[in-house]
Image: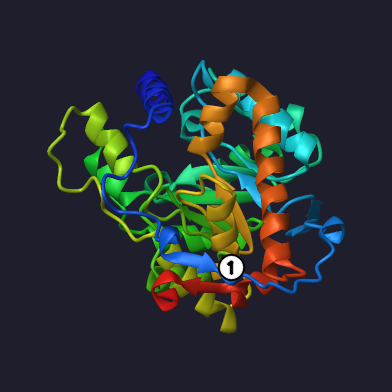
Amino acid sequence: MSEETSNRKKDHLELCLTDKVKFKEKTTGFEKYDFMHYAITEIDIKAIDFSTKFFNKWINYPFIISSMTGGAEKAEQINYQLASAANELNIPIGVGSQRQLLENDKYLRSYKIIRQQAKNIPVLGNLGMAEIVNAKVDDIKKLIDVIEADAFLVHLNPAQELLQPEGNVAFKGFLKNCKKIINEIDIPFIAKEVGAGISEEAAERLLEIGFQGIDVAGAGGTSWSGVEILRNNNLNSDFWDWGLPTSYCIKKIKMLKYGYNFVLIGSGGINNAFDMAKAFALGADYTASARTLLKAVHNGGEKEVVDLIKGWFETLKKIMLLTNSNSIQELSSKIVKKEELY
């Protein structure tokens, strides 16, 4: 079982370094929005400061290097470089699914390397909903201890599991067991999709059982249905473009802020600074990206990841100047649907 898990992770990495896994027709929806230019801006671009808190730790940018890998031989070097970049930027980083650690310790270093390289930044543990169904509290505590996690991601991937040849679609009991685990562990839990998005109704149910964060991981970026279709050589599947667009998920889930205290993470197709800026403008507290950064670390290592993220935030400063926005939060009143401009 362990080598099956490790080999699957290797397949996932290799496919995600290509553009074959993009959504075919469905988009994030960000392209349907634009920013309102403000010709008499008085923003001091040099005074813009992005530092903020992620739960109980200060970070330099409201950005997360999203969960990618672990539990495979290739993963150790990738996680080493990503963690080094996150440490330099002082931003959170998520580990890939820790399922393999529940099987044996063969690839333990591929996970531990993250905390070794990133001493003080927020590190996010990670396990899938199918594993949560039967997980014991002690199982989750073990995964947390291995990386000294500051928060824990539960990734929701029913479409991926459904299309995965070796997938597990026995999800009955997920919410009940998840609630028990959350109640017995004292770090924040974040629910995260993997590319099909989270609806407002599902998000509210997750918040009701104790989740303190929602990462929408919407449709329009990497299609994990597509990843599994490619692995299975089933190129005619109707489910490649399954999911809710990222922009839709952020807008809808933002409305739950009126009744719940939680962090909202916008991810799923965040491929450039304008995608990121629009996610913030639509209501995200933080943004996150995975495949774009995986390709960056593959092509140029830690430096390319650091330069890419710094560059996005330099562009965000320019967007803020041109929209007369003193803070990221002010962007919410500076975005408009393009159809209103014509």
Q: Residues within 10 Å of mark 1 (few under 14, many from 20)?
A: many
Q: Colour scheme in the image?
A: rainbow
In the rendered image, the residue lying farthest to the bottom is 258
Three-letter code for the amino acid on which mark 1 is drawn? Ala
Q: Residue at x 59, y 54 (%)?
A: 287
Q: Residue at x 67, y 69 (%)?
A: 323
Where in the figure is residue 258, as x and y percent of width and height?
Answer: 58, 84
In the drawing, does residue 49 fall left or right of residue 317? right
Q: Residue at x 41, y 56 (%)?
A: 218
Q: Which residue is mark 1?
A: 281
Q: Quadrant of the C terminus?
A: bottom left
Where in the figure is residue 189, as x and y percent of width and height?
Answer: 59, 57
Q: Quadrant of the N terminus?
A: top left
Vertical arrangement, residue 119 with respect to residue 208, above or below:
above
Where in the figure is residue 41, as x and y percent of width and height?
Answer: 75, 71
**In the foreground, 250 or 263:** 250
**In the foreground, 312 or 140:** 312
Q: Residue at x 42, y 59 (%)?
A: 31
Where in the figure is residue 251, as x and y percent of width and height?
Answer: 48, 72
Determine whether the residue tagged by mark 1 lies in a helix, strand or loop.
helix
